[in-house]
């Protein structure tokens, strides 16, 4: 089975931290196990900053957040952003669209309504974590 090229929005990673059995956590697990996770230096920096933020200290131990980064590292493909994208109502979301376009992604997994509203984007599916879990490649 061919691995799909997947962009996971930061909100999926963060939502998955709070419960290992949640839909976002299961989506991250599937992506790590079965697919190729695409990032840019910008989206990876955002993820690391969010995961290491003290605001999560009272909810999730920092060791668990660091363990997620360690677990992800071998499954990440850093995409060079050559073609910029300006399409989302929220300019921060354009970074994920850029990774998808420049990395020839099959899909973006997100809970962000602004991104979901763009489905499909240049032939790239944009789905919620629950839809990703039932998706057949």
Image (spheres, rainbow, N blue to C red):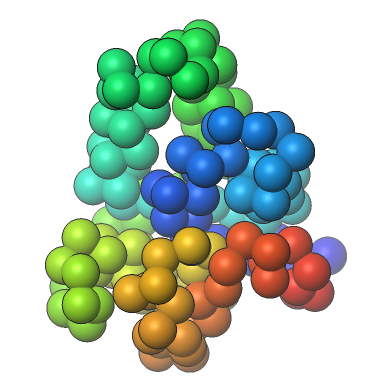
Is residue 25 positioned above or below 96 on the image?
above
Snapshot quadrant of residue 25: top right
Is residue 90 positioned above or below 80 on the image?
below
Q: How many marks?
A: 0
As drawn, the residue found furthest toward the front would be 58
Quadrant in which the N terminus appears: bottom right
Quadrant in which the C terminus appears: bottom right
Q: Residue at x 27, y 37 (%)?
A: 45
Observer able to see residue 125 = yes
Where does the image place residue 34, in percent across and percent down from the top left? 74, 52
Is residue 70 positioned above or below 128 on the image?
above
Observer able to see residue 102 = no
Snapshot quadrant of residue 135: bottom right
Where does the image place residue 62, in percent across and percent down from the top left? 45, 12
Where does the image place residue 51, in percent across and percent down from the top left? 38, 28
Q: Nearer the viewer, residue 54 or 34?
A: 54
Q: Residue at x 62, y 61 (%)?
A: 129
Snapshot quadrant of residue 136: bottom right
Q: Residue at x 52, y 42 (%)?
A: 15
């Amino acid at each position: 089975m061919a691995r799909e090229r997947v962009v996971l929005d930061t909100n999926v990673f963060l939502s998955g931290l709070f419960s290992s059995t949640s839909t976002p956590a299961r989506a991250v697990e599937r992506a790590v196990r079965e697919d190729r996770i695409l990032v840019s230096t910008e989206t990876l920096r955002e993820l690391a900053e969010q995961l290491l933020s003290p605001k999560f200290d009272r909810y999730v131990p920092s060791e668990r957040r660091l363990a997620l980064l360690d677990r992800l590292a071998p499954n990440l493909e850093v995409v060079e952003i050559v073609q910029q994208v300006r399409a989302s109502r929220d300019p921060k979301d354009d970074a994920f669209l850029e990774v998808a376009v420049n990395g020839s992604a099959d899909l973006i997994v997100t809970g962000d309504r602004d991104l979901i509203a763009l489905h499909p984007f240049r032939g790239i599916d944009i789905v919620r974590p629950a839809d990703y879990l039932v998706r057949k490649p």
